[in-house]
Image (spheres, rainbow, N blue to C red):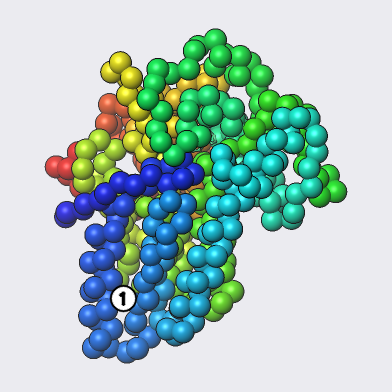
Protein backbone atom coordinates (compact mmCIF):
# COMPACT_ATOMS: atom_id res chain seq x y z
CA UNK A 1 0.00 0.00 0.00
CA UNK A 2 1.31 3.42 -0.87
CA UNK A 3 0.67 6.52 1.17
CA UNK A 4 2.02 9.96 0.52
CA UNK A 5 1.71 13.26 2.26
CA UNK A 6 2.83 16.82 2.36
CA UNK A 7 3.36 18.86 5.48
CA UNK A 8 1.93 22.19 6.41
CA UNK A 9 2.04 23.94 9.72
CA UNK A 10 -1.11 25.04 11.41
CA UNK A 11 -1.27 28.26 13.31
CA UNK A 12 -2.16 26.56 16.59
CA UNK A 13 1.46 25.72 16.42
CA UNK A 14 0.88 22.24 15.13
CA UNK A 15 2.39 20.84 12.01
CA UNK A 16 -0.35 18.82 10.40
CA UNK A 17 0.47 16.02 8.06
CA UNK A 18 -1.59 15.82 4.96
CA UNK A 19 -0.66 12.27 4.31
CA UNK A 20 -4.20 10.98 4.36
CA UNK A 21 -5.24 13.14 1.48
CA UNK A 22 -4.17 10.83 -1.29
CA UNK A 23 -5.90 7.91 0.40
CA UNK A 24 -8.98 10.01 0.94
CA UNK A 25 -9.08 11.18 -2.66
CA UNK A 26 -8.78 7.60 -3.88
CA UNK A 27 -11.69 6.59 -1.65
CA UNK A 28 -13.73 9.59 -2.72
CA UNK A 29 -13.17 8.88 -6.39
CA UNK A 30 -14.19 5.26 -5.85
CA UNK A 31 -17.24 6.33 -3.90
CA UNK A 32 -18.26 8.80 -6.59
CA UNK A 33 -17.85 6.14 -9.25
CA UNK A 34 -19.92 3.74 -7.20
CA UNK A 35 -22.59 6.34 -6.58
CA UNK A 36 -22.89 6.96 -10.29
CA UNK A 37 -24.17 3.42 -10.80
CA UNK A 38 -25.98 2.75 -7.54
CA UNK A 39 -28.69 4.27 -5.36
CA UNK A 40 -28.46 8.02 -4.73
CA UNK A 41 -28.17 7.55 -0.95
CA UNK A 42 -24.73 6.06 -1.62
CA UNK A 43 -23.50 9.50 -2.69
CA UNK A 44 -20.57 11.18 -1.04
CA UNK A 45 -20.07 14.88 -0.41
CA UNK A 46 -16.55 15.99 0.32
CA UNK A 47 -15.17 19.37 1.26
CA UNK A 48 -11.79 20.66 2.37
CA UNK A 49 -12.04 23.47 4.88
CA UNK A 50 -9.02 25.71 5.32
CA UNK A 51 -8.86 26.50 9.02
CA UNK A 52 -6.31 26.40 11.84
CA UNK A 53 -3.84 27.09 9.01
CA UNK A 54 -4.47 23.64 7.62
CA UNK A 55 -7.02 21.69 5.60
CA UNK A 56 -9.71 19.79 7.45
CA UNK A 57 -11.34 17.10 5.33
CA UNK A 58 -15.08 16.78 5.86
CA UNK A 59 -17.06 14.03 4.17
CA UNK A 60 -20.75 13.16 4.39
CA UNK A 61 -22.47 10.11 3.04
CA UNK A 62 -26.02 9.91 1.76
CA UNK A 63 -26.89 13.50 2.65
CA UNK A 64 -29.05 15.66 0.45
CA UNK A 65 -26.59 17.89 -1.50
CA UNK A 66 -28.21 21.15 -0.33
CA UNK A 67 -28.05 19.98 3.30
CA UNK A 68 -24.45 18.83 2.86
CA UNK A 69 -23.48 22.21 1.49
CA UNK A 70 -25.19 24.03 4.34
CA UNK A 71 -23.51 21.77 6.87
CA UNK A 72 -20.07 22.40 5.42
CA UNK A 73 -20.63 26.18 5.63
CA UNK A 74 -21.72 25.80 9.26
CA UNK A 75 -18.70 23.65 10.09
CA UNK A 76 -16.41 26.22 8.54
CA UNK A 77 -17.91 28.94 10.76
CA UNK A 78 -17.66 26.68 13.79
CA UNK A 79 -13.95 25.97 13.18
CA UNK A 80 -13.20 29.67 12.63
CA UNK A 81 -14.89 30.52 15.90
CA UNK A 82 -12.97 27.89 17.87
CA UNK A 83 -9.74 28.96 16.24
CA UNK A 84 -10.14 32.62 17.19
CA UNK A 85 -11.32 31.84 20.73
CA UNK A 86 -8.66 29.32 21.70
CA UNK A 87 -5.55 30.43 19.86
CA UNK A 88 -2.60 30.51 22.26
CA UNK A 89 -0.71 33.48 20.87
CA UNK A 90 -3.04 35.45 18.60
CA UNK A 91 -5.35 38.06 20.16
CA UNK A 92 -8.66 36.53 21.21
CA UNK A 93 -10.53 35.04 24.14
CA UNK A 94 -7.75 32.80 25.43
CA UNK A 95 -5.18 35.58 25.37
CA UNK A 96 -7.56 37.79 27.37
CA UNK A 97 -8.07 34.96 29.87
CA UNK A 98 -4.31 34.46 30.21
CA UNK A 99 -3.69 38.17 30.78
CA UNK A 100 -6.23 38.21 33.61
CA UNK A 101 -4.90 35.01 35.22
CA UNK A 102 -1.32 36.33 35.12
CA UNK A 103 -2.52 39.45 36.95
CA UNK A 104 -4.34 37.30 39.57
CA UNK A 105 -7.71 38.62 38.45
CA UNK A 106 -10.87 36.72 37.62
CA UNK A 107 -12.58 36.93 34.22
CA UNK A 108 -16.12 36.27 32.99
CA UNK A 109 -16.16 33.20 30.74
CA UNK A 110 -19.16 31.92 28.77
CA UNK A 111 -20.66 28.48 29.31
CA UNK A 112 -19.03 26.86 26.26
CA UNK A 113 -15.57 27.97 27.29
CA UNK A 114 -16.24 26.95 30.88
CA UNK A 115 -17.28 23.47 29.73
CA UNK A 116 -14.04 22.91 27.79
CA UNK A 117 -11.90 24.23 30.65
CA UNK A 118 -13.66 22.00 33.18
CA UNK A 119 -13.35 18.97 30.89
CA UNK A 120 -9.66 19.73 30.34
CA UNK A 121 -9.15 20.01 34.09
CA UNK A 122 -10.80 16.59 34.55
CA UNK A 123 -8.66 15.04 31.83
CA UNK A 124 -5.56 16.61 33.34
CA UNK A 125 -6.39 15.19 36.76
CA UNK A 126 -7.06 11.74 35.30
CA UNK A 127 -3.69 11.86 33.52
CA UNK A 128 -1.90 12.61 36.79
CA UNK A 129 -1.01 16.04 35.41
CA UNK A 130 0.88 14.70 32.37
CA UNK A 131 -1.70 16.33 30.11
CA UNK A 132 -1.49 19.83 31.53
CA UNK A 133 -2.85 22.77 29.52
CA UNK A 134 -1.73 25.08 32.37
CA UNK A 135 1.92 24.96 31.21
CA UNK A 136 1.53 27.70 28.60
CA UNK A 137 4.55 29.57 30.01
CA UNK A 138 6.78 26.54 29.43
CA UNK A 139 5.56 26.09 25.88
CA UNK A 140 6.12 29.78 25.19
CA UNK A 141 9.63 29.59 26.71
CA UNK A 142 10.44 26.75 24.32
CA UNK A 143 9.47 29.09 21.47
CA UNK A 144 6.47 27.13 20.23
CA UNK A 145 4.09 30.09 20.47
CA UNK A 146 5.01 31.09 16.99
CA UNK A 147 3.97 29.88 13.54
CA UNK A 148 7.66 29.56 12.68
CA UNK A 149 9.60 26.84 14.43
CA UNK A 150 12.23 27.95 16.95
CA UNK A 151 15.87 27.72 15.83
CA UNK A 152 17.49 26.85 19.15
CA UNK A 153 19.41 26.87 21.39
CA UNK A 154 16.96 25.42 23.92
CA UNK A 155 16.00 27.63 26.87
CA UNK A 156 18.39 27.88 29.82
CA UNK A 157 18.00 25.04 32.31
CA UNK A 158 17.62 27.49 35.15
CA UNK A 159 14.68 29.25 33.48
CA UNK A 160 12.97 25.92 32.86
CA UNK A 161 13.57 24.81 36.45
CA UNK A 162 12.04 28.02 37.74
CA UNK A 163 8.85 27.50 35.76
CA UNK A 164 8.60 23.82 36.70
CA UNK A 165 9.06 24.72 40.38
CA UNK A 166 5.97 26.95 40.20
CA UNK A 167 3.95 23.80 39.34
CA UNK A 168 1.15 25.44 37.36
CA UNK A 169 -1.80 23.06 37.22
CA UNK A 170 -5.38 22.88 35.95
CA UNK A 171 -6.27 22.18 39.59
CA UNK A 172 -5.37 25.81 40.32
CA UNK A 173 -8.36 26.97 38.26
CA UNK A 174 -11.51 28.01 40.04
CA UNK A 175 -14.89 28.20 38.38
CA UNK A 176 -17.58 30.23 40.12
CA UNK A 177 -20.67 32.11 38.89
CA UNK A 178 -19.49 32.25 35.30
CA UNK A 179 -16.08 33.57 36.30
CA UNK A 180 -12.72 31.92 36.01
CA UNK A 181 -9.77 32.59 38.29
CA UNK A 182 -6.59 30.84 39.32
CA UNK A 183 -4.98 30.39 42.71
CA UNK A 184 -1.62 30.56 40.93
CA UNK A 185 -0.50 33.39 38.65
CA UNK A 186 1.87 30.90 37.00
CA UNK A 187 -1.06 29.32 35.13
CA UNK A 188 -1.11 30.19 31.44
CA UNK A 189 -3.49 28.12 29.35
CA UNK A 190 -2.40 26.46 26.12
CA UNK A 191 -5.13 24.28 24.67
CA UNK A 192 -3.02 22.95 21.78
CA UNK A 193 -3.17 19.39 23.17
CA UNK A 194 -6.97 19.22 23.13
CA UNK A 195 -8.45 21.97 20.93
CA UNK A 196 -8.43 19.94 17.73
CA UNK A 197 -10.34 17.12 19.40
CA UNK A 198 -12.79 19.59 20.89
CA UNK A 199 -13.36 21.21 17.49
CA UNK A 200 -13.96 17.83 15.88
CA UNK A 201 -16.45 16.81 18.59
CA UNK A 202 -18.40 20.03 18.09
CA UNK A 203 -18.33 19.49 14.33
CA UNK A 204 -19.80 15.99 14.71
CA UNK A 205 -22.48 17.32 17.09
CA UNK A 206 -23.37 20.02 14.56
CA UNK A 207 -23.60 17.45 11.76
CA UNK A 208 -25.99 15.33 13.82
CA UNK A 209 -28.06 18.37 14.77
CA UNK A 210 -28.46 19.13 11.07
CA UNK A 211 -29.54 15.57 10.35
CA UNK A 212 -26.32 14.15 8.92
CA UNK A 213 -25.65 10.75 10.43
CA UNK A 214 -22.81 9.44 8.23
CA UNK A 215 -19.56 11.28 7.90
CA UNK A 216 -16.00 11.91 8.90
CA UNK A 217 -14.07 14.97 10.03
CA UNK A 218 -10.34 14.54 9.53
CA UNK A 219 -7.72 17.10 10.51
CA UNK A 220 -4.50 15.74 9.05
CA UNK A 221 -4.99 12.20 10.35
CA UNK A 222 -6.71 13.11 13.63
CA UNK A 223 -10.34 12.27 13.06
CA UNK A 224 -13.78 11.28 14.23
CA UNK A 225 -16.24 9.30 12.13
CA UNK A 226 -19.94 8.58 12.57
CA UNK A 227 -22.26 6.16 10.83
CA UNK A 228 -21.14 4.36 7.69
CA UNK A 229 -19.26 5.22 4.56
CA UNK A 230 -21.20 2.85 2.38
CA UNK A 231 -20.41 -0.81 2.04
CA UNK A 232 -16.81 -0.86 3.20
CA UNK A 233 -15.19 0.32 6.42
CA UNK A 234 -12.97 3.35 6.27
CA UNK A 235 -9.28 2.41 6.39
CA UNK A 236 -6.78 4.93 7.63
CA UNK A 237 -3.01 4.81 7.87
CA UNK A 238 -0.91 5.59 10.93
CA UNK A 239 2.13 7.54 9.93
CA UNK A 240 5.58 6.12 10.36
CA UNK A 241 7.12 8.59 12.83
CA UNK A 242 10.49 8.27 11.08
CA UNK A 243 10.48 8.44 7.32
CA UNK A 244 7.77 8.29 4.73
CA UNK A 245 4.84 5.96 4.51
CA UNK A 246 2.38 4.42 6.90
CA UNK A 247 3.42 2.02 9.62
CA UNK A 248 -0.02 0.60 10.30
CA UNK A 249 -3.60 0.66 9.06
CA UNK A 250 -6.82 0.78 11.07
CA UNK A 251 -10.42 0.31 9.99
CA UNK A 252 -12.72 2.90 11.52
CA UNK A 253 -15.87 1.45 13.09
CA UNK A 254 -19.04 3.47 13.60
CA UNK A 255 -18.69 6.41 15.95
CA UNK A 256 -15.10 6.68 17.07
CA UNK A 257 -12.10 8.99 17.13
CA UNK A 258 -8.49 8.22 16.24
CA UNK A 259 -5.77 10.63 17.37
CA UNK A 260 -1.99 10.50 17.15
CA UNK A 261 0.57 12.63 18.99
CA UNK A 262 4.10 12.53 17.61
CA UNK A 263 7.51 14.08 18.09
CA UNK A 264 7.66 14.76 14.34
CA UNK A 265 4.77 17.23 14.27
CA UNK A 266 6.69 20.31 15.44
CA UNK A 267 10.35 20.09 16.31
CA UNK A 268 13.74 21.57 15.71
CA UNK A 269 17.24 20.12 15.89
CA UNK A 270 20.00 21.80 17.78
CA UNK A 271 23.51 20.37 18.01
CA UNK A 272 22.24 16.98 16.92
CA UNK A 273 19.35 16.80 19.41
CA UNK A 274 15.65 16.88 18.64
CA UNK A 275 13.47 19.30 20.60
CA UNK A 276 9.75 18.79 19.99
CA UNK A 277 6.51 20.40 21.12
CA UNK A 278 5.15 17.92 23.68
CA UNK A 279 6.52 19.04 27.01
CA UNK A 280 6.79 16.91 30.15
CA UNK A 281 5.40 19.17 32.92
CA UNK A 282 7.60 17.32 35.47
CA UNK A 283 10.91 18.17 33.82
CA UNK A 284 10.04 21.16 31.64
CA UNK A 285 11.75 19.40 28.69
CA UNK A 286 10.27 17.70 25.62
CA UNK A 287 8.99 14.29 26.73
CA UNK A 288 11.56 11.54 26.19
CA UNK A 289 11.29 7.94 25.11
CA UNK A 290 8.40 8.11 22.63
CA UNK A 291 8.04 8.81 18.91
CA UNK A 292 4.27 8.54 18.61
CA UNK A 293 1.12 7.48 20.41
CA UNK A 294 -2.16 6.60 18.71
CA UNK A 295 -5.39 6.45 20.69
CA UNK A 296 -8.84 5.23 19.64
CA UNK A 297 -11.71 6.42 21.82
CA UNK A 298 -15.34 7.39 21.41
CA UNK A 299 -14.99 11.16 21.71
CA UNK A 300 -12.27 13.23 20.08
CA UNK A 301 -11.61 15.58 23.02
CA UNK A 302 -10.64 12.65 25.23
CA UNK A 303 -8.67 10.92 22.46
CA UNK A 304 -6.68 14.10 21.77
CA UNK A 305 -5.84 14.81 25.42
CA UNK A 306 -5.04 11.14 26.04
CA UNK A 307 -2.65 10.90 23.08
CA UNK A 308 -0.74 13.88 24.49
CA UNK A 309 -0.78 12.47 28.05
CA UNK A 310 0.39 9.00 26.98
CA UNK A 311 3.13 10.52 24.90
CA UNK A 312 4.42 12.23 28.04
CA UNK A 313 3.91 9.07 30.11
CA UNK A 314 6.24 7.22 27.74
CA UNK A 315 7.11 3.52 27.48
CA UNK A 316 7.28 2.86 31.22
CA UNK A 317 4.06 4.56 32.35
CA UNK A 318 1.61 4.66 29.48
CA UNK A 319 -0.36 1.57 30.49
CA UNK A 320 -1.01 2.93 33.94
CA UNK A 321 -2.01 6.38 32.67
CA UNK A 322 -4.23 4.89 29.95
CA UNK A 323 -6.07 2.84 32.58
CA UNK A 324 -6.49 5.92 34.79
CA UNK A 325 -7.94 7.85 31.83
CA UNK A 326 -10.23 4.99 30.77
CA UNK A 327 -8.48 4.51 27.43
CA UNK A 328 -8.48 0.93 26.12
CA UNK A 329 -7.03 1.20 22.62
CA UNK A 330 -3.49 2.51 22.45
CA UNK A 331 -0.49 2.00 20.17
CA UNK A 332 2.86 3.49 21.14
CA UNK A 333 6.11 3.62 19.17
CA UNK A 334 9.09 4.18 21.44
CA UNK A 335 12.32 6.00 20.70
CA UNK A 336 13.95 2.83 19.35
CA UNK A 337 11.06 2.20 16.94
CA UNK A 338 9.53 -0.63 18.98
CA UNK A 339 5.74 -0.87 18.81
CA UNK A 340 3.58 -1.77 21.83
CA UNK A 341 -0.19 -1.98 21.98
CA UNK A 342 -3.05 -2.82 24.28
CA UNK A 343 -4.82 -6.10 23.52
CA UNK A 344 -7.88 -4.14 22.33
CA UNK A 345 -5.73 -2.14 19.89
CA UNK A 346 -4.04 -5.30 18.58
CA UNK A 347 -7.40 -6.46 17.26
CA UNK A 348 -7.75 -3.26 15.27
CA UNK A 349 -4.32 -2.63 13.80
CA UNK A 350 -2.72 -4.12 10.72
CA UNK A 351 1.04 -3.51 10.80
CA UNK A 352 2.40 -2.80 7.35
CA UNK A 353 5.58 -4.83 7.29
CA UNK A 354 8.54 -3.60 5.39
CA UNK A 355 7.61 0.05 5.79
CA UNK A 356 9.19 0.59 9.20
P1 LIG B 1 -0.55 17.55 17.72
O1 LIG B 1 -1.89 18.22 17.82
O2 LIG B 1 0.57 18.41 17.27
O3 LIG B 1 -0.60 16.26 17.00
P2 LIG B 1 -0.82 17.16 20.56
O4 LIG B 1 -2.28 16.93 20.52
O5 LIG B 1 -0.05 16.23 21.40
O6 LIG B 1 -0.13 17.13 19.17
O7 LIG B 1 -0.63 18.65 21.07
C1 LIG B 1 0.63 19.24 21.23
C2 LIG B 1 0.40 20.66 21.70
O8 LIG B 1 -0.16 20.62 23.03
C3 LIG B 1 1.66 21.47 21.83
O9 LIG B 1 1.91 22.19 20.65
C4 LIG B 1 1.33 22.41 22.97
O10 LIG B 1 0.56 23.48 22.50
C5 LIG B 1 0.46 21.56 23.86
N1 LIG B 1 1.20 20.77 24.88
C6 LIG B 1 2.51 20.44 24.92
N2 LIG B 1 2.79 19.68 25.99
C7 LIG B 1 1.63 19.51 26.66
C8 LIG B 1 1.25 18.82 27.86
N3 LIG B 1 2.13 18.12 28.59
N4 LIG B 1 -0.06 18.89 28.23
C9 LIG B 1 -0.97 19.59 27.51
N5 LIG B 1 -0.68 20.24 26.38
C10 LIG B 1 0.59 20.22 25.95
MG1 LIG C 1 -3.44 15.92 21.85
- The residue lying toward the viewer, choosing from 272 and 213, is 272
Q: Residue at x 40, y 17 (%)?
A: 153
Q: Residue at x 21, y 43 (%)?
A: 244
- The kind of secondary structure element at disc 1 is loop
Q: Quadrant of the N terminus?
A: bottom left
Locate residue 11 relative to residue 105 in the image: left or right. left
- The residue lying toward the viewer, choosing from 123 and 273, is 273
Q: Could you say where residue 177 lies in the image, as x and y percent from the top left?
A: 85, 48
Q: How many marks?
A: 1
Q: Residue extending furthest right? A: 177
Q: Quadrant of residue 166?
A: top right
Disc 1 under 8 Å from ligand 1? The reply is no
Locate residue 112 relative to residue 127 in the image: left or right. right
Q: Residue at x 55, y 65 (%)?
A: 77
The answer to whether residue 311 is above or below residue 113 is above
Q: Could you say where residue 176 lies in the image, as x and y percent from the top left?
A: 83, 44
Q: Could you say where residue 327 lies in the image, as x and y percent from the top left?
A: 50, 45
The answer to whether residue 150 is seen in the rendering is: yes
The answer to whether residue 243 is above or below residue 157 is below
Q: Which residue is mark 1?
A: 231
The answer to whether residue 5 is above or below residue 145 is below
The answer to whether residue 201 is seen in the rendering is: no
Q: Quadrant of the C terminus?
A: top left
Q: Could you say where residue 130 lies in the image, as x and y percent from the top left?
A: 55, 31
The answer to whether residue 196 is above or below residue 227 is above
Q: Residue extending furthest left? A: 354
Q: Residue at x 68, y 51 (%)?
A: 113
Callout 1 environment at 10 Å: few (<14), some (14 to 19), or many (20+)?
few
Locate residue 18 relative to residue 190 in the image: left or right. left
Q: Quadrant of residue 134?
A: top right
Q: Residue extending furthest top? A: 158
Q: Residue extending furthest front? A: 91
Amino acid sequence: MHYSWTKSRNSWGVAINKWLRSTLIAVVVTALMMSACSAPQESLYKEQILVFGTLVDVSFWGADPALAQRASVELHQLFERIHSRWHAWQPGMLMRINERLAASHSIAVDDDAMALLRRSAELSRASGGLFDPAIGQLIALWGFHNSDLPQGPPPAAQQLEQLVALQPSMADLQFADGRLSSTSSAVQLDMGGVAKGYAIDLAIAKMRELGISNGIVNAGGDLRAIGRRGERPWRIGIRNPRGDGAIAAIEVRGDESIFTSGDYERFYQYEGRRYHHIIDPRSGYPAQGTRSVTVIHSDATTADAAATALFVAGPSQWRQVAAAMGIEQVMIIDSSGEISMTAAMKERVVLLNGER
